[in-house]
Amino acid sequence: MRLAAAWLLGASVACAAEAPAAPAPPATGIEQPPSAQQRLELAVAATDTVRYRRVRLRCGSLVLSEADNWYVPSRLTPEMNRTLASSDIPFGTVVAPLKFRRKTLAAAAVRQGTTIFRVKAVLLNPENRPFSLVMENYQRDLLGR
C-alpha cells in the first residue's frame, strides 16, 4: 500500500485544496469473516483465527480509498496485536519490523458504486509466509469533485 499511498498523496487533484491525505481510524464494530478463498490465500485452516480491519484514506471530507484487511494474529508479535487492537496506527507501520514484502494478486479498473480501481495483495514475511490479505478500493474522489 506504500506505493499506492504515495501515488494518492502526490497525484490527487481533489486533495490539493483540502487538508493533506491521512488515514482515518479503523472502522469498529464491523466483522467480515474471511471466505474460503481468502483463507487459502492466507494459508490458514478453517479453525485458525483471522482478524479483520477496515480503514479509509481521507483527504479532508473526501474518501480516497477504503481497504479491507484480513490478518493472522498468530503470525504477528503480541505487541503488534496489542497496537492493532488499541490504536489507529496504520497496519503497515505496525508490521514494518517484520520486513515484509507485498505481492499483488490482482489489480483492475471497476465500476462498483464509488469504487473505480481495486487492488488485492498479500503481505509475506521473509520466509514467504502470508500474514495479511488486503483489498484496496480506490474511490472516484481521486479524480476530483
Image (spheres, grey):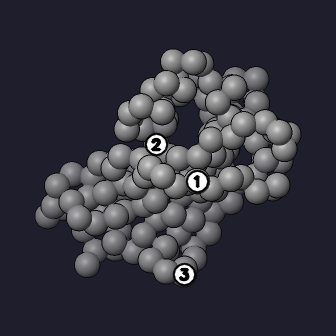
Per the image, label 3 sits on a secondary structure element best described as: strand
Is 98 positioned to the left or the right of 46 in the image? left
Relative image position of residue 71 (x, y in whole percent): 64, 39
**Identity of the amino acid at label 1?**
Glu
Whole-number angstrom distance, CA of label 1 to CA of label 2: 25 Å
Q: Is residue 55 visible?
A: no
Relative image position of residue 125 (x, y in whole percent): 68, 27
Which residue is painted at 72% across and 37% down in the image? 49
Rendered position, 34 above or below 50:
below
Is 4 positioned to the left or the right of 13 in the image? right
Quarter placement of the C terminus: bottom left
Q: Which residue is mark 2?
A: 2
Q: Does the CB distance between marks 1 and 3 fall below 8 Å?
A: no
Tell me which label, 1 or 3, sits earlier in the chain.
Answer: 1
Per the image, label 1 sits on a secondary structure element best described as: loop
Relative image position of residue 136 (x, y in whole percent): 54, 57
Hey, which residue is sitting farthest left in the picture? 17
Q: How many marks?
A: 3
Per the image, label 2 sits on a secondary structure element best described as: helix
Whole-number angstrom distance, CA of label 2 to CA of label 3: 24 Å
On residue 31, the disc is 1
Tell me which label, 1 or 2, sits earlier in the chain.
Answer: 2
Which residue is painted at 37% across and 54% down in the image? 57
Q: Which residue is mark 3?
A: 111
On residue 42, the disc is none
Relative image position of residue 120 (x, y in whole percent): 64, 56
Q: Is residue 119 visible?
A: yes
Q: Nearer the viewer, mark 1 or mark 2?
A: 1
**Identity of the amino acid at label 2?**
Arg
**Identity of the amino acid at label 3?**
Arg
Which residue is painted at 48% across and 33% down in the image? 85
